[in-house]
Image (cartoon, coloured by chain):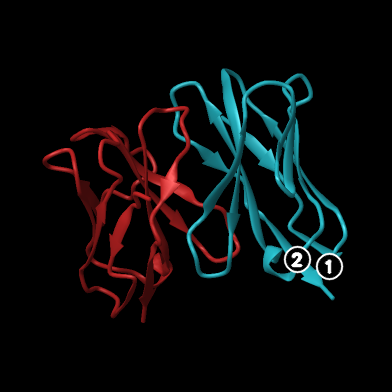
Amino acid sequence: GQNIDQPTEMTATEGAIVQINCTYQTSGFNGLFWYQQHAGEAPTFLSYNVLDGLEEKGRFSSFLSRSKGYSYLLLKELQMKDSASYLCAVSEGNTPLVFGKGTRLSVIA
Amino acid sequence: EAEVAQSPRYKITEKSQAVAFWCDPISGHATLYWYRQILGQGPELLVQFQDESVVDDSQLPKDRFSAERLKGVDSTLKIQPAELGDSAMYLCASTSGLADTIYFGEGSWLTVV
């Protein structure tokens, strides 16, 4: 099974850059997902990495290193609306997606 | 844009009562999941359906929880009797393939008093 570890909380300033790390232990790796979840709402899909490297999508980028069991989500030009929880999730073999506990990001002025 | 539909959005129930949640996945998505999310935690899988068949219900507390997807489309999750520890958000999600992106519904908030 997967052991997914990500920081519990982070704080960053509006307009800055923040990196949210995720480490995992798994076999039969299929891919890694990042989801954003605002308080009281359902998770929404942000990114998917299956190969090593950086995937860029606007202000958000996600990086994967399969050999290190490591990923990060990079948020640039932070806005107040980016305050949310960010969930790292791993797909392994034939098992359903397994989520980490999430990182609660607070963006301050 | 197609969405996963869930109802009710909010439910308050007394302990020992029965409660049910309904989900209609994105059209054409054969795989449907029910997750439970406790405040401050990530979603945890309760049950996975492939069409009308249960693929994984190893984490479903079967003494009180049941789930069905009779025609392989919409699904119902039932809790009877509800306990205080069941207070959580119940999320339905669907995908067209196992490694494909999972799309979540808005969730059903349950408070057991």
Task: Tell me what residue is drawn at x 34 percent, y 49 percent.
Answer: B2
Task: Tell me what residue is drawn at x 51 percent, y 62 percent.
Answer: B38
Q: Check disc 1 and report its element: helix, strand or loop.
A: loop
Q: Does the residue at mark 2 contact the one at mark 1 (Cβ under 8 Å)? A: yes
**Residue A84 at x, y = what percent?**
65, 63
Front residue of this view, candidates A43 and B85: A43
The shade of chain B is: red
Task: Tell me what residue is drawn at x 57 percent, y 69 percent.
Answer: A39
Is residue A63 positioned above or below A109 on the image? above
Q: Check disc 2 and report its element: helix, strand or loop.
A: loop
The residue under label 1 is: A14
The type of residue carrying mark 1 is Glu
Crowding at dot 1, Cα within 10 Å, few <14 / some 14-19 / many 20+, comes out as some
Quadrant that contains the C terminus of chain B: bottom left
The residue under label 2 is: A79
Q: Quadrant of residue A21?
A: top right
- Numbered disc 2: what chain? A
Task: Tell me what residue is drawn at x 47 percent, y 27 percent.
Answer: B99
Q: Quadrant of residue A25?
A: top right
Is residue B102 positioned above or below A25 on the image? below
Q: Is residue A100 left or right of residue B67?
A: right
Q: CA distance from mark 2 to mark 1?
A: 5 Å
The shade of chain A is: cyan
Is residue A28 positioned above or below B91 on the image? above
Front residue of this view, candidates A103 and B85: A103
Crowding at dot 2, Cα within 10 Å, few <14 / some 14-19 / many 20+, comes out as some
The type of residue carrying mark 2 is Gln
**Residue B77 at x, y = what percent?**
25, 55
Q: Earlier in the sequence, mark 2 or mark 1?
A: 1
